[in-house]
Image (cartoon, helix red, strand yellow):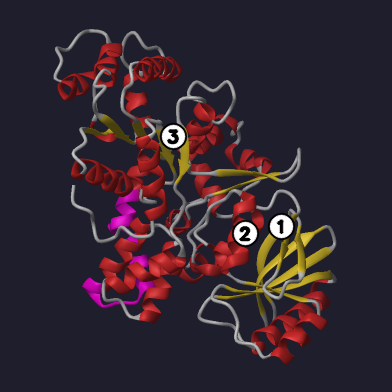
Amino acid sequence: MALNTYFVDREEEISTILGFIKARANVLIYGLRGIGKTTLLEKVHDILIHEGRKVLYIDGYEILSPEDLFVISRRTPTMDARDSVRFIFEMLDHVIIIDEFTSLIQMLARYRPFGNVEDVVKYIRSQIQLRQRRGGESIIISSSALGFIKRATMKYFAPLFREFKLLFIGPMSFEAIYELAIKHGIKEEEAREIAELSTGNPFYARKIIEQVIAQGISPREALFKLIESKGDLDIYFTALMENLQAEERYILHLIARGRNRFYEIEEKLYKDPSPYLKRLEDNGLVLKIKKTRKFSQYIIPDKVFQAWLLSQEIPSLGKISREAIYVSSLGFEALVRELLRSITSVIKIRDWLGQSLELPPFRAVYNVSGHDYEIDAVGLRNNEAYVFEIHFWGKARYNKVLQLIKNAELFAKDYGKRIKEKVLISYFGYELTNKEKEKIKEQGIKLLTSKELREIQKKTGVKLGF
């Protein structure tokens, strides 16, 4: 398993996994599809083989029946699916790596004597405990089914609560994706755009880079070619949707188009959406953001997937223009709006100048186009508005501060809202004189950079690639 050229920025995760293996602890790696879990496992596999360790690597997607597991363990097949699991876990001298473990569980649940997924999980737990008592090597598993992982491992009485160390693999940073693009000969400006468009997903970054190199087009044009009919990502997402029920597919289209409250979904679906939303959550396709006991929103954490959904023409929902797709789902501004929507309790931080800033759970977050101005993000809290100017391309200068002030004044006049905070966000920092910094403090304007965004992201628990 050769390490591919798109692997970068995972040294800390590798070190953590190898440390757990040394301690003979079991590890469950989870994260969204395409985020790099498989490549990470392949790298760990290569390191262990180089060290002379015995390793059994299983791709859960390639295991279609218990017989495949019997073949891998070189044992005689039986009519009991439990034996296929037991024989694998009896290989005590091997570090066992199972990629997309949830797919394996779902397959086993279809065979006797298992009756459902819960039966499989309970049996696996018993075999892991027996393996540990016998001094077996570590088991490393991965999954993209985030809701399933939460139910199976994150509660005190969950079946696998005590059996695994949990390691979340989030998006790569913009800096890492930029580095990745530069390594492949992409020019600096295009590399920054790829970092912005891929939202920290190395799989999407790879596809965009390949398209840019092959066709000599801009990263934005490359991404739209990928998500349009017969593009690589169109094929990928179409295959994903084919595994969903019609109600689940429709709900995804509704959420992508901003109908993300439970009652809005129920109204369009003409039935209770609860079971469908639960399955979508389990598969990591939607995320529930609970603001208060009675107020929740659903978001699609994969913004490229959301862009693809918006590019599909649905008779009752219509088709969205490229520009509208970019504004709503792609680019740095869209990610920041998603981060602001993810806040569920008051977050207190210090801005770039050391000033105190409190960000509440917003009732609504959206961009605004006025008669002669545009605002990247407005967060509403009761009758108060938080106005955000967002800058990605290099370090922001004082003219961005002036633009923020002007836009906030026009918004307050047009919409009759009291401006609670004016916030400038510049991912790569600022070029300001000391005099300009003092003016900014006097005007009560807050400045945020990638450092503060990562702090907010950490407190929300929603990983968006900052």
Residue at coordinates 30% horizontally, 49% vertically from top-left?
A: 39
Q: Residues within 10 Å of mark 2 (few under 14, many from 20)?
A: some
Does label 2 or label 3 sit earlier along the sequence?
A: 3
Q: Nearer the viewer, residue 59 or 242?
A: 59
Q: Circle 1 is placed at which residue position?
A: 364
- Say what secondary structure mark 3 lies in: loop
Q: Are marks 2 and 1 in contact (CB under 8 Å)?
A: no
Seen in the picture, residue 446 relative to 228 is either above or below; the reply is below
Of the residues shown, which amino acid type is indicated by label 3?
Answer: Gln
Which numbered tag is attached to residue 255? none
Q: Circle 3 is placed at which residue position?
A: 245
Q: Circle 2 is placed at which residue position?
A: 455
The residues tagged by marks 3 and 1 sit, at their Cα atoms, a distance apart of 30 Å
Q: Say which of marks 2 and 1 sits in front.
A: 2
Of the residues shown, which amino acid type is indicated by label 2?
Answer: Glu
The image shows residue 224 at horizontal and vertical percentages of: 37, 66
Q: Say which of marks 3 and 1 sits in front.
A: 1
The image shows residue 116 at horizontal and vertical percentages of: 42, 16
The image shows residue 443 at horizontal and vertical percentages of: 81, 82
Task: Please report the bounds of the magenta region as a residue range.
Answer: 213-236
Is residue 245 at all visible to an observer of this figure? yes
Seen in the picture, residue 204 relative to 398 is either above or below; the reply is above
- Say what secondary structure mark 2 lies in: helix
Judged left or right of residue 64, residue 119 is: right
> Number of marks in the image?
3
Judged left or right of residue 86, residue 2 is: left
Q: Does residue 322 show up magenta in the picture? A: no
Q: Nearer the viewer, residue 453 or 378?
A: 453
Of the residues shown, which amino acid type is indicated by label 1?
Answer: Ala
